[in-house]
Amino acid sequence: MGKLASIRYDAYNSHMPYPSSSFDQNTTKNTIWSVSDLNQQARNCLESAFSGVQVEGEISDLIQHRSGHWYFTLKDDEGQLRAAMFSFKNKSVRFTPENGQHVILTGKLSLYAPRGSYQFITERMAPAGAGQLQQAFEKLKRELEEQGLFDPEHKKPLPSFPRQVAIITSPQGAAIRDIQTTFERRFRGIQLIVIPVAVQGDGAAQAIANAIDTANRWSKDNQAKALPATPALISTTNVSPDAIIVGRGGGSIEDLWAFNEAVVAQAIFRSELPIISAVGHETDTTIADFV
């Protein structure tokens, strides 16, 4: 773990001998400051000099206040830093922070005047491993794009009147309930065929790929029976889907990682059935979305 001194700068020219601000040392060195005025001046200097920076460390002394604000200490082996993340910012955090967790914070240094102590005002929080995962995501995305897996001409058109749709997801997750509700409301004549899989953890990516292959095999074998035209969840091999939905609810980049694996991308690419990727929230993007 690096030292707190190894803050990464986004908006501060680190070679400057001291931060630029409205503080004029020549004209104010003989000024007698009130405590509150000096604190305010120090706050202005800190926020001007250390805005948009990132710092990595371990969470400790986490307090989740009833107001919704989070207060905690960020530490490493040789230092610590008080930090806060206000409720209107922490609502966007897609994981539950815990003491002992390593995170990367983005925000600014400020000063809390009542105590005269400086603190880090957090605007974004991410698990420390997310940076490496994002790099792996971008690397695989480039490789698959070069291989032609994202080319538009390979995408299969959706059928105008699908009779059966295979749903590849966790049977216990929120995604299956949302999908079923949508079909009941808008597409009552379509049968839903659930192929249950784990959507995160060891083996999840291979399970998803296998399920895609299974749905294609069912369709190719053309084993469908005449089924009643009601939206129902069916778990049987005696079906013939016309399309596939692969999905899960939202989560962190770690939670969604199974859908960023090459084995899933390749299964989507070789599928003869059109596939809709319904992974995460609207703001989430996975490799499965591009194929």
Image (cartoon, helix red, strand yellow):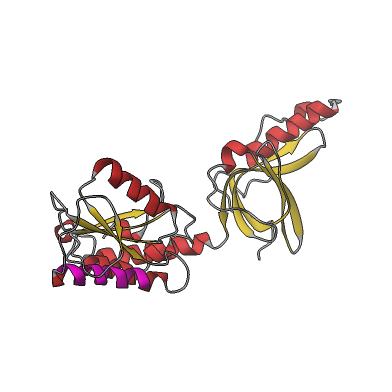
Query: Would residue 99 be found to the left or right of residue 253 on screen?
Result: right
Residue 215 percent location from the top left of the image? 24, 67
* Above or below, 84 relative to 278: above
* Above or below, 213 relative to 281: below
Please provide the residue range marked out in magenta: 207-219
* Above or below, 222 relative to 105: below
- The one of 29 and 103 positioned closer to us in this rendering: 103
Q: Residue at x 16, y 64 (%)?
A: 225
Per the image, is 217 magenta? yes
Residue 206 percent location from the top left of the image? 36, 73
- Number of labels in the image equals 0
Residue 40 percent location from the top left of the image? 75, 29
Query: Would residue 173 be found to the left or right of residue 76 on screen?
Result: left
Q: Is residue 32 visible?
A: yes
- The one of 142 and 18 positioned closer to us in this rendering: 142
Q: Is residue 6 visible?
A: no
